[in-house]
Every structure is written in structure tokens, then in C-alpha cells.
Amino acid sequence: MPKLPDIVRNPLAFIAARWTPSPALVRRAVLAALVMSVVIVVTGGAVRVTASGLGCPTWPTCSGDSLLGTRAMGVHHAIEISNRMLTYVLCATVGWAIIAIRAQAPLRRGVYRLAWAQFWVVVLNAVWGGLTVLTKLNPYVVSFHFLLSAALITVAALTWHRIGEGDASPRPLVGKPVRQLGQVLVAASAVLIVVGTLVSGAGPHPGESTGSYKVQRIDVDWRTVAQLHADFAWVVVGLTVALWFVLRAVDAPVGPQHRVRDLFLVLMGQGVIGYVQYFTHLPAALVDLHMFGACLVWIAVLRVLLSFRERPCAEPGASVPSAAAAPARISL
């Protein structure tokens, strides 16, 4: 049997042997994947608040045997199919990040695994998104769809942070009690997001309002759940303020203090949006903006936790492949 060319057997290794991206290019590629992971949440929210969730009534096709459907299916179809097509853009940006990280010299295996984790979460979430259609927008399935998006943002944000670090063992910048308080903040923020999905699942935006199908809702008063959501929001704000005072008291480095300050500002903006949308009876545009704010809050929380330690930008004695040991590489 003839031997397959290298580019077919291992295309990523083939590219890595001939091209070395600059650190700035790699960081931009990873940032693009993070940005797209937020964009797909915002466009998915737009599908829901515009009642376009069943604009394509089947999956993986849009309608019958048609992958894209037709213009005659109306504006809800256009919104839904646009969100589906953005999944391919997300896959492309994650794929570009994987290629750029793989082509770095030397290969950073931990970061490379994180990049691949993004890809598999994207695949899982795309399949789960199809399940939301097949279950006719079951609110629990839809809620988990958002949580998978939060998982994607988590991995993307961690990859973005790690690409700016070295691979030496992490060194703590703050004491153990401060780190534990940060972990409590992360846990409270995670609960806040989960409760937020319940508000959405019980609220007045089921995702489909054409009258062709009655979408199931979570059988609780959405105002009661919204109050619980607001209570957890204040818990997160309180923990953030407490953490800021503790960091000031122990004279922590400015990095963690700035990250906590950033989180507080994002929380304030998100709180204003949340209360305005509640008292204006959840207008669609504000609901979608609130989902965008939730993404920013989660990223800011993760950045706080990650700021509590540092890794050197380069490990002493790290080996770099010599030019004689590999084919000629193009550096950009």
C-alpha cells in the first residue's frame, strides 16, 4: 500500500514544520475564538427573544431535505439559519487557533489541549442545539444549551490567559484565604448563571410565538425566580467588594486588584441592565443585552481567579527545535 503524503497523514504537523506564527498572531487567533464564543451566545439569544427558535423546524436540516430552507419561510427562518451558519464561523476561528498554537515552536502541549477542548465543546453544543429544536425548545434543554456555551467561554478564556503565560509551575501571588474567597466568588457566580437560565426558562420569551406549537415552560413564577437571581447577584457583588477590601488590606499586587475592580464595574453595568429589563417587562433587546453582560461577568470572574497566580513567560532550559532538525519554517 503506498505511503500517504505527510500533509494527509498529519496536516497540523506538516504546517507546524514549515511555518512559525508570531506570538502576537497566536494571541489574536485565540482572542478571536473567545470573541466568537461570546458572539454565538448573543446571536443565540437573539433567536430566542425574536421567537425564531423554530424558524428551522428540523435538524440537522432546516426543513425537510433542505439544509438552508427558503426565503419564503420568513424572517424567523432567516434569524435562525443565520445563527446556525455562525456556528461554522465559530468552528473556523477555533480551528485557526488550534493551527496557530500547534505551529508555535516549541509546542505547548497544555495550551494545545485547551484549544482542542474548545473544538469538542463547540461540537457538543452544536449537537445539543439541534436537540433543542428536536425537543421543540424544551426549557431545560435550552438552559443546558446556554450552560454549554458558558463552558466554551470558560475554556476559551483560559486558553487566552494561558497563551500569555509560560509553562513553569504557577506561583501564588496572594495567600490561601484570599484564593479561597476567590473560589467562593466563582461558585456564587456559577450559581447566579444557573439561576439566570431558570429565569429565562420560566419567563415570557419561550423562543417561538407563531402559534404553530405551544412551547413548554418551567412551571414556576418567573418573577419569583428573578428575585432569587437578583439575590444571588447581590451576593456576588458583596463578595467582589469584600475581595477588593481584602486585597487592599494585604497589600496584594496591582494585577488582582485591577481584575476585581474590572469585575465590579461589569457587575454594576449588568445590574443596571437587569433591573431596567425587569421593570420594563423584559423587552427583547435588553434581554439579549443582559445575556451579553452575563458572558462579560463570567469572563471577568475567571480573570479574577487567574490573576491570583503567575507563571514565568519562559521556562529556563526550554528546548527549541534547531533548523537542522526540521524543514525550513516561515516565521510571521
Image (tube, rainbow, N blue to C red):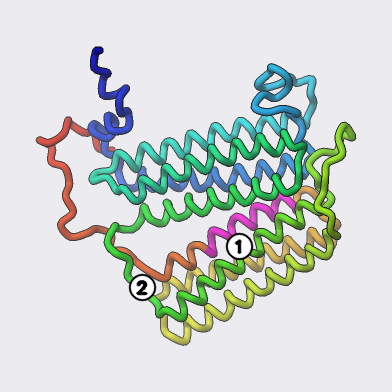
Q: Residue furthest top?
A: 1
Where residue 277 appears, as percent x and y from the top left, is 79, 58
Q: Residue at x 29, y 58 (%)?
A: 166
Q: Residue at x 84, y 54 (%)?
A: 219
Where residue 269 appears, as percent x and y from the top left, is 66, 64
Residues rendered magenta in the picture = 287-301
User: Would you place residue 8 above or below residue 281 in this image?
Assistant: above
Mark 2: secondary structure = strand
Q: Residue furthest right?
A: 211
User: Would you place residue 72 above or below residue 15 in this image?
Assistant: above
| Residue 29 can be seen in this image | no
Q: Report which residue position mark 2 lands on.
A: 172
Taking the magenta stretch, the answer to whether it contains residue 298 is yes
**Identity, as a three-letter code, of the amino acid under mark 1:** Ala
Q: Report which residue position mark 1 lands on.
A: 190
Where residue 281 appears, as percent x and y from the top left, is 85, 56
